[in-house]
Image: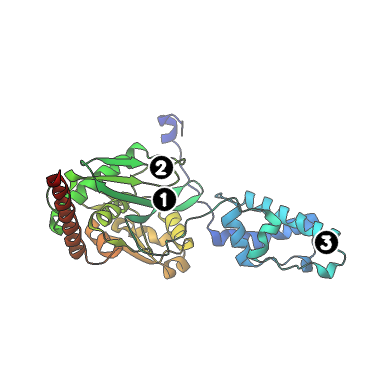
Amino acid sequence: MNIPAPLLDRMEIIRIPGYTEEEKVNICERYLLPKQMKKNGVKQNELDLPRETLSEVIRYYTREAGVRGLEREMAKLCRKVVKEQVTSKTKDSVNALITPERIEDYLGVKKFRYGLAEEDNQVGQVTGLAWTSVGGELLSIESVITPGKGRIVKTGSLGDVMQESIQAALTVVKGRAEGFGLPADFFESHDLHIHVPEGATPKDGPSAGIAMVTALMSVITNTEIRADVAMTGEVTLRGKVLPIGGLKEKLLAAHRGGIKTVIIPDENERDLKEIPENIKKELEIRPVKWVDEVLDVALSGNIAKNVASVIEKQAATQQNQQGRLSTH
C-alpha cells in the first residue's frame, strides 16, 4: 500500500479473507443460481445442479476470492440450458441434471487446475503450501543431486527471500548430514538443483523453509517423502521452525488437494481457531518446533540404511572410475 506512514498510523486496517469453497457453494446454491435462472427464464425443473458440480465449476472455471466470476459462469450455464430447450425437438429430451462429467459441454474446456497430492511417495519431491491473493495453493518443490563440484542451482522464478531460504535450508541439512553418516566431503563432490515448477509464476517468501529442508534431506539420503504430507514453515539455521501467515487458506488448499497430514509451526497452533471444524476433522494437523520433527513425520523409510547404500554406491563409482583410468 502506497499510503504515507503518518496517515496509515491513523487508520484501522481491516483484512477481509476470501470465501472458502464451502461458502461459495452455499452462496451459489442459495442466491447466484436462482438469480440467474430467473433472469434467463430457466424453470426449476429445467436445471438440476448438484453441489459436486458447483464445486467443479469453482475449482476449474474460477480463481477469485469472491464470487463475481462464479456468477458469470452460472449466467453462461443458464443461457446454454435455454438454448438446449429452444433447439431440442421435445422438452423431455433435455437432461436437466448436469453432472461434473457434463459440465464441459456447457462451460467449455477447463480454464484452471488446482494442486493435487501425489499418488506415490517420491524421492526429492515435497509438497509445500503457498498463500496467494485468491486463496491457498499446493506448491511442489523438486530437488535432484548429481556428481559435481558442490554447486547449488535454484530455478523456478524464485524471489530473493525464497533463494535465501534455500541457502538456510542447505546449511541446516549440512549441519545434520554427519549425524546420518554422510562423509564430510559429500557436498563438495555433488551438485544440487532445486526447482519449483510453473517457472513463469514468480514465487517468494520464507514459508517454504521446512519443505526445502525435507526435499534436500530426501534426495541426499535417497529417502522417499510421504505423498500425503504437506508442510509450511520458516526454518532457522539451528533448525527451529518459525510461524507463517495465511494458515487458513493453506489448510483449505491442502484439504481440497487430498492431503491427509499437514505440518505447521507450533506457534501457529493458536490460528487453528479460525479453521472450519470439518477441515480440522479431516486433516491430521501436526504442530512442530524443530525441523527434526518434520523429518520424522515426512520421510518414509530408514535414513541410516539409505545413507549406507548411497555411500556404498559412491564408493563403487569411484572404484570404477579409477579402474578406467588405470587401463589407459
| Residue 290 seen in the current view | no
Q: Earlier in the sequence, mark 1 or mark 3?
A: 3
Q: CA distance from mark 2 to mark 3?
A: 47 Å
**Residue located 24% across and 54% down the image:** 220
Q: Amino acid at mark 3?
A: Gln
Mark 2 closeness class: few <14, some 14–19, many ≥20 residues within 10 Å: some
SS at circle 2: loop
Q: Which residue is mark 1?
A: 130
Q: Please name whichever residue, 31 or 202, is drawn nearer the observer in this view of the structure.
A: 202
Query: Looking at the image, do the residues carrying marks 2 and 1 touch, with CB atoms under 8 Å apart?
Result: yes
Q: Please name whichever residue, 323 or 40, is drawn nearer the observer in this view of the structure.
A: 323
Q: Which mark is residue 203?
A: 2
Picture coordinates of residue 98, whole percent (x, y): 69, 65
Picture coordinates of residue 125, whole percent (x, y): 35, 55
Residue 227 quadrant: bottom left
Query: Looking at the image, do the residues carrying marks 1 and 3 touch, with CB atoms under 8 Å apart?
Result: no
Residue 224 quadrant: bottom left
Q: CA distance from mark 1 to mark 3?
A: 44 Å
**Residue located 82% across and 69% down the image:** 93
Q: Amino acid at mark 2?
A: Lys
Q: Which residue is mark 3?
A: 85
Q: Please name whichever residue, 185 or 6, is drawn nearer the observer in this view of the structure.
A: 185
SS at circle 1: strand
